[in-house]
Image: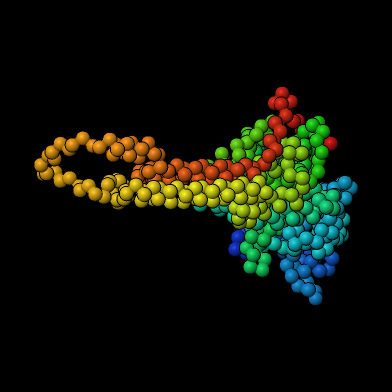
């Protein structure tokens, strides 16, 4: 039978493929704290499956299956992960069929951001198992917890490229009519691939029916993986899954909703909704709208376009979300790509062209006004001094200690007539008039630039307002069997 190992019974452990022998260890099962030594030997440790896969040690325990680290022997020697269906679950034809389907759909995807399947087999006892690649790294949940412990979160410049990988993997699955239905931080696994430290692998395509425990306090990553009555993790469940009586279509957009929750959680460090039980969270998801990421974390410097993108992905009604994961990916790329102001959008480009033309006309008017003022000042015998005052060149500057000048004789009537004509002529201006003219023109130019900025902001915003959540008068969801 080979060597045996003793493991303590676990309450729960993610059923995905977890880290082994790397810089970080994966989450460990929570142990009972009742003081009883209920450790039991694991009969699979040391077993060799199909004559080639030696089971080494357990990595995680779920409601339907246990994941082990194993070594493939023979011509090819490598460490792998084995997901072994439990004996109890193996007696259910429906569960076995779903387990086989998971293996088949993962094998058919052939996507770089989906965990690879190497082999599917059956033990002598009749239990189905899947052999998959062993991933070394950490989940996004662990990455976020580290960032929060340092007083921060995951910035969009880092999160956006990771979400593009998730969108690509999900779009490939949706193209094959496969819906993951359990996208969450702990099912997004970060590995270092070819020097890319944020390479994402999606885990756990085999979702199970779960039991909804109303008296269980909801935590951010508490999965409901026992045989039961609900599909998915409550904090990431879309409204159309929570309340089927809404008669909304259930398609790939349920994964989009969960992806929006993942982005919200990573950007803010908190989940959109919290509650004392899973039912509280489910009810709020359908009937309430959470604060936007910018409202929830105003000090995180979340861009407005990212704020709108996340809230649209999390819209209550499926039709208010993006059409598919490819459309969401395009929106993410737009927020990550540098935007030249002249090419940001047709509306902003047109506004910019108008602003440039108006600015040029303003500059031409300013040049003409300056030239006209100088010409008039020259013709009238005036000079503009640095202090900004105009004076006749023939008059000396009076001194403070000068004796009072004698009274001047009455001017000649012809001279008065010429001076009156000069006063009535509005053209001759001093330097003060020039300052006023230039100031008004600059204010006009500034107003044009502000209007341009507002126009660009409106063109980037989502023109469609989200639908209101269903009225709160609807009954709370109940745990019903299927």
Let me know if residue 179 appears in the view.
yes
Picture coordinates of residue 1 (x, y %)? 79, 64
- Quarter of the image for residue 111 reads bottom right
Q: Residue furthest right?
A: 93
Q: Quadrant of the C terminus?
A: top right
Report the residue at 68% width, 39% height from top.
463
What's the residue at 77%, 42% (across, down)?
Answer: 231
Q: Is residue 213 visible?
A: no
Residue 304 picture location, percent across and down = 59, 44
Q: Is residue 417 left or right of residue 260?
A: left
Q: Residue furthest top?
A: 473
Q: How many marks?
A: 0
Q: Nearer the viewer, residue 93 or 305?
A: 305
The residue closer to the viewer here, 187 or 417, is 417
Q: Is residue 327 above or below residue 247?
A: below
Q: Quadrant of residue 278?
A: top right
| Whole-percent x, y for residue 320 in the image | 73, 38
118 on left or right of 61: right
Locate residue 375 relative to residue 216 in the image: left or right.
left
Identify the residue at horizontal 63%, vertical 56% (top origin): 337
Q: Tell me the residue at 50%/50% (across/down).
A: 363
Where's residue 68, x and y in %? 73, 59
Which is more toward the observer, 28 or 173?
173
Indicate whether 390 appears above or below 46: above
Q: Please, which colouring scheme is shown? A: rainbow
Q: Nearer the viewer, residue 470 or 224?
A: 470
């Amino acid at each position: 039978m080979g060597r045996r190992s003793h493991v303590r019974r676990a309450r729960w452990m993610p059923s995905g493929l977890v880290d082994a022998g790397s810089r970080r260890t994966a989450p460990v099962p929570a142990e009972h704290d009742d003081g009883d030594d209920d450790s039991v030997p694991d009969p699979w440790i040391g077993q060799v499956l199909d004559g080639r896969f030696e089971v080494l040690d357990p990595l995680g325990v779920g409601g339907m299956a246990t994941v082990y680290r194993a070594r493939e022997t023979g011509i090819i020697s490598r460490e792998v992960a084995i997901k072994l269906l439990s004996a109890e679950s193996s007696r259910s034809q429906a569960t076995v069929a779903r387990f086989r389907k998971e293996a088949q759909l993962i094998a058919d995807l052939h996507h770089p951001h989906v965990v690879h399947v190497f082999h599917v087999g059956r033990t002598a006892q009749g239990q189905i198992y899947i052999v998959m690649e062993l991933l070394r790294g950490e989940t996004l949940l662990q990455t976020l917890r580290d960032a929060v412990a340092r007083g921060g979160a995951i910035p969009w410049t880092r999160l956006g490229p990771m979400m593009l990988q998730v969108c690509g993997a999900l779009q490939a699955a949706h193209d094959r009519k496969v819906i993951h239905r359990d996208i969450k931080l702990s099912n997004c696994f970060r590995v270092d691939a070819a020097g890319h430290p944020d390479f994402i692998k999606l885990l756990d395509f085999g979702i199970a029916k779960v039991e909804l425990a109303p008296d269980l306090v909801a935590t951010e990553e508490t999965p409901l993986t026992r045989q039961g009555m609900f599909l998915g993790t409550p904090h990431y469940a879309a409204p159309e899954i929570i309340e089927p009586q809404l008669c909304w279509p259930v398609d790939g957009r349920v994964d989009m909703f969960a992806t929006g929750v993942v982005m919200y959680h990573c950007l803010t460090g908190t989940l959109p909704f919290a509650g004392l039980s899973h039912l509280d969270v489910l009810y709020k998801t359908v009937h309430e709208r959470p604060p936007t990421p910018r409202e929830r974390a105003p000090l995180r410097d979340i861009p407005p376009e990212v704020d709108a993108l996340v809230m649209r992905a999390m819209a209550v009604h499926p039709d208010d979300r993006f059409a598919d994961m490819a459309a969401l990916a395009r929106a993410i790329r737009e927020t990550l790509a540098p935007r030249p102001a002249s090419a940001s959008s047709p509306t902003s480009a047109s506004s910019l062209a108008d602003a440039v033309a108006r600015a040029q006309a303003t500059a031409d008017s300013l040049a003409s006004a300056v030239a006209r003022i100088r010409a008039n000042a020259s013709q009238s015998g005036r000079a503009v001094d640095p202090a900004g005052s105009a004076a006749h060149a023939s008059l000396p500057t009076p001194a403070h200690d000068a004796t009072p000048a004698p009274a001047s004789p009455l001017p000649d009537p012809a001279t008065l007539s010429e001076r009156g004509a000069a006063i009535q002529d509005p053209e001759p201006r001093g330097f003060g008039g020039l300052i006023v003219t230039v100031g008004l023109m600059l204010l006009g130019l500034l107003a044009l630039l502000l209007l341009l900025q507002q126009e660009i902001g409106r063109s980037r915003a989502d023109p469609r307002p989200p639908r209101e959540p269903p009225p709160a008068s609807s009954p709370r969801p109940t745990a019903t069997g299927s």
